[in-house]
């Protein structure tokens, strides 16, 4: 039976009970609320720890700019997710991606493994030699980690030149400590024929879409935060209760304890990081599994510039370990309104666990200037935003650890959903589907 809708509120204004409580007002939580409202549910409470909703989907709109705090574009083959995105954001720009890799004083086209012919002779020899040594033999043994998988599929030359330095720079984890199941959602591997064309400059490589984000869209107005604002309009009168950090989940009594008071619930959806939800619920048999969960911390610098010296790539991968950033995004090529009369550059840095971002802006600016990408006189303003967790690291035991924790949470009546709730490398379309799925577990008989 649904709980009564007229409920008491604590002195902080937090309702003391709600039929459905959603923890976290990021994309998945907002989508879940929308779906529940569409299904006729009204007694919904969204709890958010931060000062505002949106999670990672935030846009810097200060000083006349419209620059996302992290680079975001939307791509999907899911018609339902695409329809929701377009409805929430309004008109969009449509693009076919142009991507590059910063390479030895210049650039090569991305995917790196499809464009080996653009490398110098010695690097091409390294790639070819490694493939001949391995002879691309079929190995019946299932790879045990990302290192074994990438060596089998790409050969040691490509792995050592690009794949290893870039991914270990981003994930701050050795390839041998990562699973590879996630890879198909990010890149498509060329196979033997594709590698031959890549090395020799044939026509096969690059003919087909080489990545899921080959075609992408982006809001015409407001930056990626327009998606959040559209969802907030769609879920009125449900408004996220912000500044309410969850301190404990008492699943037996169906009570969520927050820093603003306690809330009784009938059903509970959590989009909190999986390790945090497990500990808040006191599921001690999961503690060993969640102790293995790790995530990256990403610090993103947003540059408003008068000019920038880069090829017209939408984004550029930077594998060189001596350079402090792993990716550059030309935000002005994606959002022409990002910096009126100027250019916008997003610079992403992965910070080691326990590491400090002190002095990072100075190091990044010096590196950009040293590489000839920007001149200091052309820097109008720089903003820095820190995000943790940013990307869940797909560790080698993810396929056993995560399902085990999800089952235990489910047995306690907690629906865990979203990028962090399911500890998966979700894009926006996956997060939308996760919110729809979470709501369906409540509304479907």
Image (cartoon, rainbow, N blue to C red):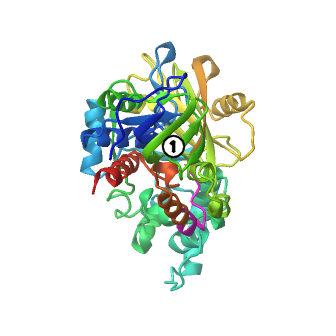
User: Position of 125 compared to 238: left or right?
Assistant: right
Name the spot of residue 246 as percent of width and height, x first: 58, 39
Residue 294: image quadrant is bottom right
Residue 91: image quadrant is top left
Q: Extreme top residue here?
A: 63
Any part of residue 313 in sight: no
Give the residue displayed 63% in from the left and 57% down from the top: 293
Give the residue displayed 37% in from the left and 54% down from the top: 212
The magenta segment is 392-402
Q: Above or below — where is 239 with respect to 34?
A: above
Residue 291 lies within the magenta run? no
User: Position of 151 compared to 183: left or right?
Assistant: right
Instruction: Please count the marks in the image.
Output: 1
Residue 247: image quadrant is top right
Residue ID for mark 1: 316
Could you say which is closer to the camera, residue 411 or residue 349? 411
Which quarter shows the C terminus?
Answer: bottom left
Could you say which is closer to the camera, residue 47 or residue 131? 47
Residue 398 lies within the magenta run? yes
Could you say which is closer to the camera, residue 350 or residue 118? 350
Name the spot of residue 145 as percent of width and height, x first: 59, 70
Name the spot of residue 280 as percent of width and height, x first: 61, 48
Name the spot of residue 297 as percent of width and height, x first: 63, 43
């Amino acid at each position: 039976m649904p709980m009564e809708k007229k409920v008491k509120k604590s002195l902080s204004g937090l309702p003391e009970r709600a039929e459905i409580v959603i923890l976290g007002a990021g994309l998945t939580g907002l989508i879940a609320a929308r779906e529940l409202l569409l299904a006729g549910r009204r007694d919904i409470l969204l709890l958010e720890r931060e000062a505002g909703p949106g999670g990672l989907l935030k846009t810097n709109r200060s000083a006349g700019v419209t620059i996302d705090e992290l680079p975001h574009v939307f791509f999907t083959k899911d018609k339902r997710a695409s329809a929701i995105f377009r409805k929430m954001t309004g008109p969009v720009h449509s693009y076919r991606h142009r991507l590059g890799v910063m390479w030895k004083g210049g650039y090569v086209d991305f995917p790196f493994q499809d464009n080996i012919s653009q490398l110098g002779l010695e690097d091409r020899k390294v790639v070819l030699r490694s493939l001949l040594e391995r002879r691309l033999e079929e190995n019946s043994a299932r790879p045990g980690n990302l290192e074994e998988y990438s060596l089998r599929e790409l050969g040691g030359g490509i792995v050592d030149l690009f794949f290893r330095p870039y991914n270990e720079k981003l994930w701050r984890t050795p390839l041998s400590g990562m699973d590879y199941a996630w890879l198909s959602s990010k890149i498509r591997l060329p196979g033997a024929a594709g590698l031959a064309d890549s090395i020799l400059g044939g026509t096969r490589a690059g003919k087909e879409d080489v990545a899921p984000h080959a075609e992408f869209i982006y809001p015409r107005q407001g930056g990626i935060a327009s998606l959040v604002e559209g969802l907030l309009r769609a879920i009125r009168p449900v408004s996220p209760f912000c500044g309410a950090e969850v301190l404990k989940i008492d699943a037996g009594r169906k009570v969520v304890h927050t820093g603003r008071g306690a809330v009784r619930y009938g059903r509970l959806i959590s989009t909190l990081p999986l390790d945090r939800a497990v500990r808040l619920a006191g599921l001690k048999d999961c503690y060993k599994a969640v102790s293995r969960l790790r995530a990256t911390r990403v610090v993103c610098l947003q540059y408003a510039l008068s000019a920038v010296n880069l090829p017209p790539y939408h984004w550029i991968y930077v594998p060189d370990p001596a350079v402090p950033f792993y990716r550059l995004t030309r935000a002005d090529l994606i959002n022409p309104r990002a910096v009126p009369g100027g250019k916008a550059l997003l610079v992403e840095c992965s910070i080691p666990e326990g590491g400090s971002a002190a002095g990072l802006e100075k190091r990044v600016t010096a590196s950009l200037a040293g590489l000839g990408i920007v001149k200091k006189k052309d820097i109008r303003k720089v903003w820095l935003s820190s995000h943790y967790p940013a990307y869940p690291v797909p560790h080698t035991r993810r396929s056993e650890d995560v399902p085990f924790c999800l089952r235990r949470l489910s047995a306690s009546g907690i629906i865990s959903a979203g990028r962090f709730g399911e500890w998966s490398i979700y894009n926006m379309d996956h997060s939308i589907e996760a919110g729809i799925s979470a709501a369906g577990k409540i509304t479907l008989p």
